[in-house]
């Protein structure tokens, strides 16, 4: 019994509670008094499984990820899955991004984000004093670029841009120099220009053009974005009530369980609900950063920060898309949107961070080690 309690010593009730509450808020947003509730029923199962995964993820000792080649081989495994899905994956909504396993579908790009966070955390933690060398930015960029390219050609631009934000956020935290940051911006601008010319599909270009002029094609490429902003605005202060969202439940707003769940949520819960949503999400990010600050080593610090960057990127890209501030890219809200793979991945990341906090004060920080050596 004492051993079991020690394994769960890092459990953070504020972090876990906020994640579960967010999942519950997303769940009830999927409920409708009109028609069936297939998504609602399935999401109950996924939430239960994801919470179980969170607790199971607290059992291992993740210090093995700091040393050896395990982290690299995990990265290679997901690299293989991202290649494989291009050949045998299921095509859904024009994207070949998931494996059809019969009773559920697996989208490897979601857990691949955690794999990228882990490999970058290890890479930067081993080279903490040398991060000013630009070649480390390039090498870490190659790790991210391989994932980015494979996800982009699925095509899943939403997940690809999240992978970029993970890499960019982690190099900022690791300590990139200002002149190197300028180089990254220039290379990014050139890369975007190249993708616009040779890689973007016509519908992706049209979405960006519609973003610049939202009213140019309301009945075509701008329809989703327009209906989303209507749904958000119609919620007003207290919303229309759970299950009574007209834009979502009457199918004016497409994909309201996934890509536009924030709009559906805002319509039913109103401004008050949105404020609560932001507070709960702030608790999640705040607790992740709390665990990062008190982490045992730079690896755990960077991993927890990377998970915070992952959630923050998804959250603000999705909301920006739903209120017309960003082009429609098809991203989920952590814990809120329908789907099994992303939900399990998110609770897995939370469980790993809490597990790492078990030994937060067991080992001194690297800076403390250098002082002791002196």
Image (cartoon, helix red, strand yellow):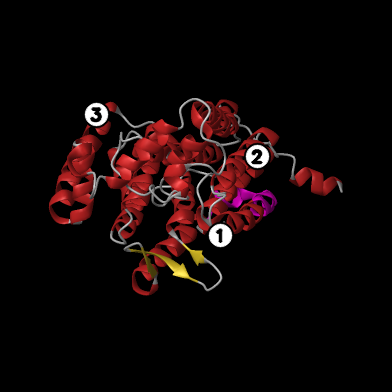
Q: Position of residue 270 (x, y in %)?
A: 50, 30
Residue 185 sits inside the magenta stretch: no
- First-in-chain label (1 vs 3): 1
| Residue beneath disc 3 | 179
Category of crowding for the residue at label 1, using alpha-carbon neighbours closer than 10 angstroms: few (below 14), some (14–19), many (at least 20): few
Question: Gap between marks 3 and 2, in whole Å?
Answer: 39 Å
Residue indicated by mark 1: 38
- The residue lying toward the viewer, choosing from 135 and 78, is 78
Residue 38 lies, with reference to residue 368, above or below; the image says below
Q: Nearer the viewer, residue 305 or 156?
A: 156
Element carrying mark 3: helix
Nearer to us: label 1 or label 3: 1
State which mark lies toward you, 2 or 1.
1
Query: Magenta includes 56?
Result: yes
Discs 3/2, front: 2
Q: Neighbour class for label 2 at 10 Å: few (<14), some, many (≥20)?
A: many
Magenta stretch in the rendered image: 51-68
Residue 109: image quadrant is bottom left
Q: Secondary structure at mark 1?
A: helix
Q: Which mark is residue 16?
A: 2
Q: Classify mark 2: helix, strand or loop.
A: helix
Answer with mark 3 or mark 2, whichever residue precedes in sequence.
2
Give me the residue at 39% from left, 70% from top: 89
Residue 221 image point, x, y percent: 24, 49
For the residues marked 1 and 3, what is the alpha-carbon distance in whole angstroms? 52 Å
Mark 2–mark 1 Cα distance, whole angstroms, equals 26 Å
The kind of secondary structure the magenta stretch mainly shows is helix
Residue 83 x/y as whole percent: 36, 67
């Amino acid at each position: 019994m004492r051993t079991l309690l020690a394994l769960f010593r890092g459990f953070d009730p504020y972090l876990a509670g906020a994640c579960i509450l967010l999942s519950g808020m997303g769940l009830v947003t999927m409920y409708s008094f009109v028609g069936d509730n297939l998504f609602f029923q399935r999401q109950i199962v996924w939430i239960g499984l994801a919470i179980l995964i969170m607790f199971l993820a607290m059992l291992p000792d993740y210090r093995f990820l700091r040393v050896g080649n395990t982290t690299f081989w995990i990265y290679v495994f997901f690299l293989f899955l991202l290649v494989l899905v291009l050949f045998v994956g299921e095509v859904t909504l024009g994207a070949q991004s998931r494996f059809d396993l019969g009773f559920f579908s697996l989208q490897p790009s979601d857990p691949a984000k955690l794999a990228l966070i882990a490999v970058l955390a290890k890479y930067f933690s081993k080279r903490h004093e040398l991060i000013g060398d630009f070649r480390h930015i390039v090498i870490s960029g190659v790790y991210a670029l391989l994932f980015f390219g494979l996800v982009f050609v699925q095509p899943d631009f939403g997940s690809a841009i999240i992978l970029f934000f993970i890499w960019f956020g982690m190099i900022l935290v690791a300590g990139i120099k200002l002149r190197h940051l300028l180089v990254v911006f220039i290379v990014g601008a050139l890369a975007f220009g190249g993708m616009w010319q040779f890689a973007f599909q016509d519908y992706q270009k049209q979405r960006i053009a519609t973003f610049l002029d939202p009213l140019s094609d309301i009945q075509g490429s701008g329809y989703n974005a327009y209906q989303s902003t209507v749904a958000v605005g119609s919620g007003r202060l207290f919303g229309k009530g759970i299950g009574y969202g007209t834009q979502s439940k009457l199918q004016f707003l497409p994909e309201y369980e996934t890509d536009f769940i924030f709009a559906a949520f805002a319509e039913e819960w109103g401004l008050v609900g949105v404020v609560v949503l932001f507070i709960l999400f702030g608790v999640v990010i705040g607790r992740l950063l709390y665990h990062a600050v008190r982490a045992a080593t730079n690896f755990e610090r960077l991993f927890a920060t990377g998970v915070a960057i992952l959630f923050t990127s998804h959250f603000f890209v999705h909301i920006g898309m739903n209120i017309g501030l960003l082009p429609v890219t098809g991203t989920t809200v952590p814990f809120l949107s329908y789907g099994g793979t992303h939900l399990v991945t998110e609770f897995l990341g939370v469980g790993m961070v809490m597990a790492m906090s078990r030994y937060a004060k067991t080992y001194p920080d690297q800076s403390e080690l250098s002082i002791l050596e002196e």
